[in-house]
Amino acid sequence: MTGPSSTVAPAEAGPVDFARYGTIYQPRGGAELAPWGTADAYPLRERISDDGPFPAAPGRYHLYVSLACPFAHRTLIVRALKGLEEVVGVSVVDPIRDGRGWAFRTGRGQTLDTAGNGFAFLSEAYEASVPDGHYTGRVSVPVLWDTRERRIVANYYPTITIDLETRFDAWARHPEVDLYPGDLRTDIDALNDHIGEHVNNGVYHAGFARTQEAYEAGYDEVFNALDGLEDRLARSGPYLFGDRLTEADVRLWVTLVRFDAVYHGHFKVNRRRLVDYPALWAYARRLHALPAFRDTTDLDQIKRHYYGTQLHLNPTGVVPKGPVVDWSL
């Protein structure tokens, strides 16, 4: 397998410093507040394709992720389900970030930049990927990095997982796992749009609301969607498309696994817990029983990230010890 032609020694970012740099949501020290939820936030949208500048190849591509981020979590699940661990590399950023953004530091469950670039901050990858080195969009995870061209292929998370699912079967340990089957793609895309807007992003609509009206709209949006998914699974489980595990299940799981630990309290979406939905709770435990879902989930990093960095919502930075949840079937 081929990797980067030359490597730079790993660098480690200095300690988190909220006093000097603020948070990513309230930056200080010259940090720019990146656009939120617009097309400009995710401008890097190339695809892996046989006839484009980024063809599939083993060892060429690398993921930059956070275990805390639900959108990055999807890529790790797909990577594991398809058996791409030896095909696509991964580096894991520190879940705690100040106004400088995602950073590489040593610690449990995180890494330095293992792609050979020597980045201390993920922003350096973005700066390396635009012609003048001046990037003003959001520095987000996941990132799909090309180790040969030394630039970002994509930071647009909806397409990264689909490319991992469909473009690397020649080297996958589990090519038979088809998460985006041709006969279901139109239906999967429609359900993904619904889950993405009303569940994955819906919790943020409530949690980041600045008015009572906006909060209540987000709150209702989330529970209307969850009620519908509860009915769907009760009628036609075990997965969202019957007995076929798909991309849609990956997208829903990453919010469900964070729901009781974070969103129910921190984002105030507290009408019901996940464990109070019979079909959704059984479904979530069924997914948790699969190593690709369970082993890529780090609730410690998830809670430390949300409670410890979103200080505009949790000014003390105190991280709750609970809840204690039994995920066994």
Image (cartoon, helix red, strand yellow):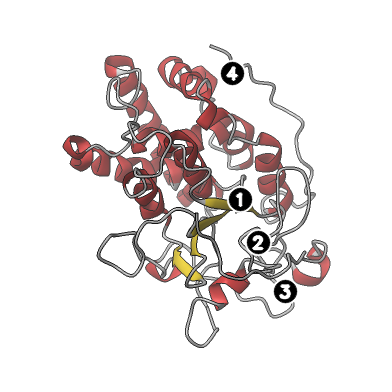
Place of residue 309 in the rendered image (x, y in percent of width and height, measured from the top left): 70, 54
The residue to which callout 2 is attached is 102
Name the foreground residue: 104 vs 269: 104
The CA distance from mark 1 to mark 3 is 23 Å
Name the foreground residue: 242 vs 104: 104
Mark found first going from the N terminus, 4 or 1: 1
Q: Is residue 191 above or below residue 278?
A: below
What is the crowding at mark 2: few (fewer than 14 residues within 10 Å), some, or many (at least 20)?
Answer: many
Outermost residue to the left? 183
Name the amino acid type tagged 2: Trp
Mark found first going from the N terminus, 4 or 3: 3
Foreground label between 1 and 3:
1
The residue to which callout 4 is attached is 327
Q: Do the residues bearing badges 3 and 2 touch, measured as CB atoms within 8 Å?
A: no
Q: Is residue 77 above or below residue 305?
A: above
Secondary element at tag 2:
loop
Secondary element at tag 4:
loop
The quadrant holding residue 27 is bottom right
The CA distance from mark 2 to mark 4 is 30 Å
Place of residue 147 in the rendered image (x, y in percent of width and height, measured from the top left): 52, 65
Which residue corresponds to the image point at 65% horizontal and 41% vertical from the top-left? 302
Mark found first going from the N terminus, 3 or 2: 3
The CA distance from mark 4 to mark 1 is 22 Å
Name the amino acid type tagged 4: Trp
Name the amino acid type tagged 1: Ser
Q: Do the residues bearing badges 1 and 2 touch, measured as CB atoms within 8 Å?
A: yes
